[in-house]
Image: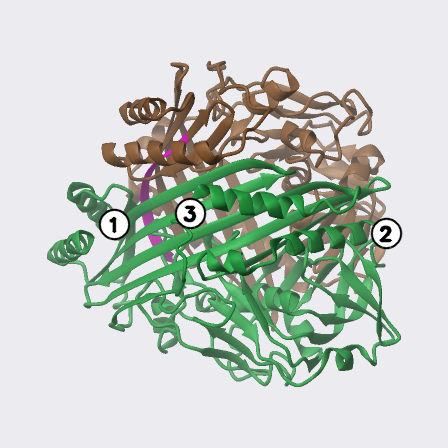
Chain colours: A green, B brown
């Protein structure tokens, strides 16, 4: 392949310039997004992006440059930019990259290439789904999105690695807004999979959007819960979001090495209750397909927490080097314009043996926190504070689910919250999303997260 | 420019009735650092967003591969999508009002010529200052970004516009540790000029904050007056109002401000403007992302809702003039009405005076998660990571880890007691420090 020859040439050229390490990443990314608003096609946008990024290390200083121009002259200029950037930083360190050489090609499986399905068919699927959302006069607005992407990446390094991956992904997102008595409530939800168009064909699109509208109508009629501390049962969506945001980021080696994370110095200590085991894994059912990272390292199953004890951080090559361990394959970059940083892949809690009824049966007054309709979360890794806007949830009264509540925001200190988990369900759901992803230091990557239903003894709920 | 013309010509040949090319070329320096410089990136990117119409059928396609062949293929793909698109009965035509408003200070000549060594030198000095500030403090993370971008917009009505802009921003975080207590301090700044960044000042301020918060604790749940620091309130305003004040949201029935023009939506002392011509503003530019001149638009004037923000599509739909608010996040995104520089106009009270006249309250220095606030209901939710108790007119104990909640629309109506004189920005959102009468805090 022409492009790989160019990559090899740049690597040879860099070595001639005297760099101690170089890697070159090529990417071609195709993306389509169809947006239907209020029964009409709002936009059909499609995007093609390709380019190359070159990373060099000179005496431990890292320089990086990227370009969309793939002519050899432009690539050479880009290499020179990377070298110039590295040379402007003075650093006296040894080789920051511990080697792992792989030569492999892996593609996520699909049956029908979504890029080859006619625009007409895709638009009509999104339109039909949107029309099914108008179930009640309280529904004031409905937005449906169909997204699909193909992400082809090639990694080559001066150590002799060549890793090529291709991930095909598709998903449907819908948001209904209900209004009643001057109150408006918005419920967004999505289903995505690393698969082809067959995933959309297999979904009941009308039920998908109608269910979201139903929840919006139910929410708009409900109240916000009083602020306070609750015993909570948290669904797989929320426990996934909570682990990913509040614990996952804190377990990322680059944030630990700067002592920015609350988990600094805590390997071998109790960081959660004994019921909690947390995994990061590259390829799992329902998750994002990430068999190798953007440093050519295999993403294996990493046990981060085992029975409440912190076992491992997540690492890319440079943070692994600082901790004197092997990379866990978590060096990921948004695209060729960015350097890999430590990122989660599919982060989840392992299930145990509680049935849902058993989780709620001894709660006199509590809350069942649900993720459907959640708006997102944020965390301060330095102090371990988190805050999440979750979906319409339910009050638990005398061991049973009672009324729906809206506008629920949960918050807390993650290490305290995880220690109050006293029961873990037997179910397991892991989800991913093509609509956005996880943001860190200006880069967004696709991730997966989830877990079972979990009971948390103390959770702060903000409301009015 | 030639490739943009080629794309438009090709699209018209293939049967498009209108076409628009938006070409953006960006050169960006991006430095990540902690206690040392982690990495230095130089990113050169170019891309073309192509919008075509076949009568009332529309499509957008973009590509970063700017060869003649790819540009022609992009035009083909766009036309192919447009053919199957259902008619948009509201579509009239692409923007025909091209022009430049006389705005100033959106390009830094110095940035174009700056040497990498100088940037690294200033940054290293700032990191050193943070370390020297106090033995308990470490710089734990930071980012520095400087970009120069060229934007060209051309459409099949033969009009074209070109602009060159610079943006500079930085973010630093210090962490303090003492006897097992940990705390952080963060500073961020977004500006158009290298010289306005002042990395050393930012570093020292972050270090100072981190030390002050070593003993911070949550407080009990209560209703209490709060003073919200300018950048924090700016962020809240942006999160909640940016959507609802656009004609796009109004026309779709999503905006709680629909059907409220010329009505009282806020207290008389509240005036909010959108100003694309603000000198040196984060989103200041002579024309918007469709080539239409920018302007200053009153949104709320003395409490009365005066205008929504329009791009050409929403303006033609309402039969009014565009306010020059077409905005594309990146070249591949279709334009949408969006604020340029959204600003709560300043009052005349200094933050010090606000604190002095507060008997009991909380001063909110930093929050996280304010973007979870709900623009439709106006429900605010943010976790206060850095705050101070105010006791008898003085800042006393630092507090953290409490959640503030309230409703911005209600706050704008009768919740704001005082408006500060210290306007500052959080990206494109501008606000002074404000004092709120009472807000709910969930804590221990």
Could you tell me how far apart the alpha carbons at marks 1 and 3 are, in whole angstroms? 28 Å
Whether residue B46 appears in magenta in the rendering, the answer is yes
Disc 1/disc 2 C-alpha distance (Å): 54 Å
**Where in the figure is residue A222, as x and y percent of width and height?**
84, 54
Q: Which residue is mark 1?
A: A82
B239 shown above or below A338: above
Expressed as whole percent of the image width and height from the top left, the position of residue A101 reads 24, 72
Q: Quadrant of the N terminus of chain B?
A: top left
Residue A391 visible in the shown view: yes
Residue matched to label 2? B223
The label shown at residue A31 is 3
Residue extent of the magenta highlight: B36-50
Q: Position of residue A440 (x, y in %)?
A: 49, 56
Are the residues flagged by discs 3 and 2 from a single subunit?
no
Say if B96 sits above or below B20 in the image.
Answer: above
**Left or right placement of residue A173 versus residue B5 in this view:** right
- Asked whether A213 falls inside the magenta stretch, the response is no
Pinpoint the chain carrying mark 2.
B
Q: Are marks 1 and 3 on the same chain?
A: yes
Q: Are marks 1 and 2 in contact (CB under 8 Å)?
A: no
Q: Secondary structure at mark 1?
A: helix
Q: How many marks?
A: 3
Q: Quadrant of the C terminus of chain B?
A: bottom right
């Amino acid at each position: 392949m022409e492009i790989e020859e160019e990559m090899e040439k740049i690597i040879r050229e860099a070595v001639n310039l005297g760099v101690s390490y170089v890697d070159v990443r090529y990417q071609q990314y195709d993306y389509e997004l169809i947006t239907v608003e209020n029964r009409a096609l709002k936009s059909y946008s499609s995007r093609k992006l390709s380019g190359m990024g070159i990373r060099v290390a000179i005496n431990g200083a890292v320089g990086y440059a990227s370009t969309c121009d793939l002519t050899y002259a432009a690539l050479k200029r880009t290499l020179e930019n990377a070298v110039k950037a590295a040379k402007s930083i003075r650093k006296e360190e040894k080789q920051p990259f511990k080697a792992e050489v792989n030569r492999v090609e892996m593609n996520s499986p699909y049956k029908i290439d979504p890029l080859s399905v006619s625009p007409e068919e895709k638009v009509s699927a999104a339109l039909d789904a949107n029309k099914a959302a108008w179930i009640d006069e309280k529904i004031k607005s409905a937005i449906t999105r169909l997204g699909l992407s193909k992400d082809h990446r090639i990694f080559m390094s001066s150590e002799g690695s060549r890793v090529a991956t291709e991930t095909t992904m598709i998903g449907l997102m819908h948001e209904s807004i209900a209004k009643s008595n001057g109150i408006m409530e918005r419920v967004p939800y999505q289903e995505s999979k690393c698969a082809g168009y067959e995933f959309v064909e297999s979904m009941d699109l009308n039920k998908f959007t109608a269910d979201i509208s139903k929840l919006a109508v139910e929410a708009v009629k409900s109240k916000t819960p009083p602020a306070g501390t609750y015993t909570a049962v948290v669904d797989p969506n929320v426990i996934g979001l909570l682990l990913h945001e509040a614990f996952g980021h804190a377990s990322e080696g680059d944030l630990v090495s700067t002592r920015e994370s609350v988990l600094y110095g805590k390997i071998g200590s109790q960081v959660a209750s004994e019921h909690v085991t947390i995994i990061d894994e590259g390829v799992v059912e329902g998750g994002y397909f990430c068999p190798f990272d953007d440093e050519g390292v295999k993403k294996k199953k990493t046990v981060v927490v085992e029975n409440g004890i912190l076992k491992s951080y997540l690492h890319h090559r440079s943070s692994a080097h600082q901790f004197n361990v092997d990379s866990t394959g978590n060096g990921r970059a948004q695209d060729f314009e960015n350097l890999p940083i430590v990122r989660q892949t599919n982060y989840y809690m392992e299930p145990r043996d509680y049935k849902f009824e058993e989780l709620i049966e001894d709660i006199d007054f509590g809350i069942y926190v649900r993720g459907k309709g959640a708006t997102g979360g944020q965390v301060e890794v330095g102090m371990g504070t988190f805050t999440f806007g979750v979906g319409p949830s339910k009050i638990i009264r005398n061991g049973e689910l009672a009324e729906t509540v809206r506008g629920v925001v949960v918050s807390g200190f993650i290490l305290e919250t995880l220690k109050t988990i006293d029961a873990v369900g037997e179910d397991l759901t892991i989800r991913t999303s093509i609509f956005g992803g996880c943001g860190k230091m200006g880069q967004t990557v696709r991730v997966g997260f989830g877990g079972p239903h979990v009971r948390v003894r103390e959770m702060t709920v903000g409301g009015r | 420019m030639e490739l943009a013309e080629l794309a438009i010509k090709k699209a018209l040949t293939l049967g498009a009735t209108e076409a628009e090319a938006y070409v953006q070329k960006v050169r960006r320096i991006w430095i990540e650092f902690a206690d040392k410089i982690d990495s230095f990136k130089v990113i050169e990117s170019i891309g073309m967003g192509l919008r075509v119409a076949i009568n009332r059928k529309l499509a957008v396609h973009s590509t970063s591969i700017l060869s003649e062949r790819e540009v022609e293929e992009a035009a083909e793909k766009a036309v192919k999508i447009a053919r199957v698109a259902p008619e948009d009965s509201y579509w009239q035509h692409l923007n025909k009002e091209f022009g430049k408003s006389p705005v100033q200070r959106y390009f830094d000549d110095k940035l174009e010529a700056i040497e990498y060594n100088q940037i690294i030198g200033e940054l290293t000095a700032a990191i050193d200052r943070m370390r020297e500030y106090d033995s308990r403090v470490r710089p734990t993370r930071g980012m520095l970004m400087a970009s120069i971008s060229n934007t060209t917009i051309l459409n099949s009505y033969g009009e074209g516009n070109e602009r060159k802009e610079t943006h500079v921003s930085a973010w630093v975080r210090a962490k303090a540790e003492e006897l097992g207590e940990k705390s952080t301090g963060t500073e961020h700044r977004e500006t158009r000029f290298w010289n306005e960044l002042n990395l050393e000042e930012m570093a020292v301020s972050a270090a100072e904050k981190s030390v002050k918060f070593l003993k911070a604790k949550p407080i009990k749940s209560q209703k209490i007056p709060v003073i919200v620091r300018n950048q924090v309130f700016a962020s809240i305003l942006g999160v909640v109002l940016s959507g609802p004040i656009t004609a796009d949201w109004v026309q779709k029935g999503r905006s709680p401000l629909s059907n409220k023009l010329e009505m009282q939506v806020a207290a008389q002392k509240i005036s909010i403007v959108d100003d694309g011509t603000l000198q040196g503003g984060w989103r200041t530019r002579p024309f918007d992302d469709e080539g239409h001149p920018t302007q200053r638009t009153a949104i709320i004037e003395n409490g009365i809702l005066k205008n929504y923000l329009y791009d050409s599509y929403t303006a033609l739909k309402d039969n009014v003039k565009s306010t020059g608010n077409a905005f594309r996040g990146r070249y591949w995104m279709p334009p949408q009405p969006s604020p340029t520089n959204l600003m709560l106009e300043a009052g005349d009270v200094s933050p010090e005076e606000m604190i002095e006249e507060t008997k009991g309250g909380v001063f909110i220095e930093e929050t996280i998660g304010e973007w979870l606030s709900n623009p439709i209901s106006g429900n605010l939710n943010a976790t206060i990571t850095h705050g101070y108790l105010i006791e008898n007119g003085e800042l006393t104990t630092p507090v953290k880890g409490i959640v503030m909640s309230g409703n911005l629309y209600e706050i704008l109506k009768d919740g704001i007691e005082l408006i500060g004189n210290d306007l500052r920005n959080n990206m494109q959102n501008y606000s002074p420090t404000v004092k709120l009468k009472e807000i709910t805090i969930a804590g221990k």
